[in-house]
Amino acid sequence: MIGFIDVSGTPYNANNKTAWVSANAICIRKRAIYEITATMHRLKRDILNSEFIELKATDLVNKSTLSHPNLDKFQYLQGVVDFCLSHKDCRHAAIVFSNIGQSKKSETNRLPRHYVDLLWRIEAIARDYGSLETETLVIIDNNAPKADKHLALAFNNYLYRSLGGEHLAKILPIPIFAVSETTAGIQLADIAAGIMRNYYTLRLNERPEEETDTPFERKLREYHAIIMARSVNRRIGRFSVNGVFVADSSYTVL
């Protein structure tokens, strides 16, 4: 299995710039990697007229796009949701938290909390497959060489030198940092993270669906429900792990 990680929003900005942050993982079984990648290639070719274009979640998951079903971007996103994010061999995990403006970057090789929490959920998905998926490779959206180096060291430090890391037996201690432009799985994680961040930014979790919902809000509810349905809740040791974790206002990444 391969777990692709992307984060929408940054917890290190003042909260008036990023009110909510969503760290998402898309976990795809090995047997489905080719099919899902080929599907994204086909959707780009047939709808966007270019196999090489990369559309970020900010280009797709927004009011302008999701309010106009005739747009190519809308049709592409709907295809990605229907055939990739909803695929039977694709599972989701997410850590969603409000940005209280108090998170700071660690100066040490300490793995930020939202990555730790995501690794636990990737482990839960791998365990849910049992012997069908014995090892999980984690691929993370790259930032910058220096930042990725520290994150890679922190990743392995957590697996090898922490009590929590001892529980993550299915995760290979060799994180790979990839460019989203050439990595379909990272693009999927980016879209899923954009869906989750917008859903909670609009506080759709706090009110029931209504006739007055805008087309944008209705689509966010539809996509959010797919991510929730394809997440995994299970126990790891004495810990109960929910596939989608919406943190309270005290959550910080350190």
Image (tube, rainbow, N blue to C red):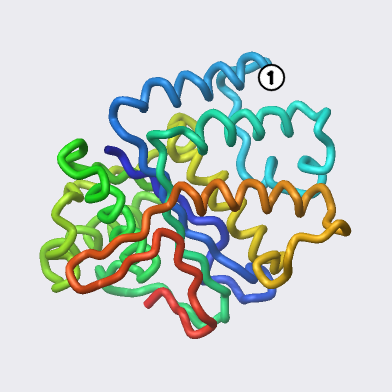
Closer-to-camera residue (34/149): 34
Where is 97 relative to 49, above or below?
below
Expressed as whole percent of the image width and height from the top left, the position of residue 92 reads: 43, 49
In the picture, which quadrant includes the C terminus? bottom left
List x then y, in percent, for residue 190.
53, 46
Residue 179 drawn above or below residue 216: above
Q: In this view, does 209 lie to the left or right of 232?
A: right
* Place of residue 95 in the rendered image (x, y in percent of width and height, measured from the top left): 45, 64
Residue drawn at point x = 69 percent, y = 69 percent: 203
Nearest the viewer among 113 and 130 is 130
Q: In this view, does 204 lie to the left or right of 234?
A: right
Q: Residue drawn at (17%, 47%), measured in percent from left and top?
A: 172
Residue 207: which quarter of the image?
bottom right
Q: Is residue 15 left or right of residue 93?
A: right
Mark 1, Cα crowd under 10 Å, few <14 / some 14-19 / many 20+, is some
Q: Image point 30% across, 39% down: which residue? A: 2
Q: Does the image show residue 143? A: no
Q: Is mark 1 on a helix, strand or loop?
A: helix
From the viewer's perspective, tell me whether residue 4 is left or right of residue 227.
Answer: left
Tally of marks? 1
Q: In which quarter of the image is residue 81?
A: top right
Q: Where is mark 1, residue-wise? A: 47
Q: Which residue lies furthest to the right in this view?
A: 212
- Three-letter code, disc 1: Ile
Instruction: Name the residue located 66 percent from the left edge and 59 percent from the top edge.
Output: 199
Of the 4 image quadrants, the one containing the N terminus is top left
- 159 to 188, vertically: above or below: below
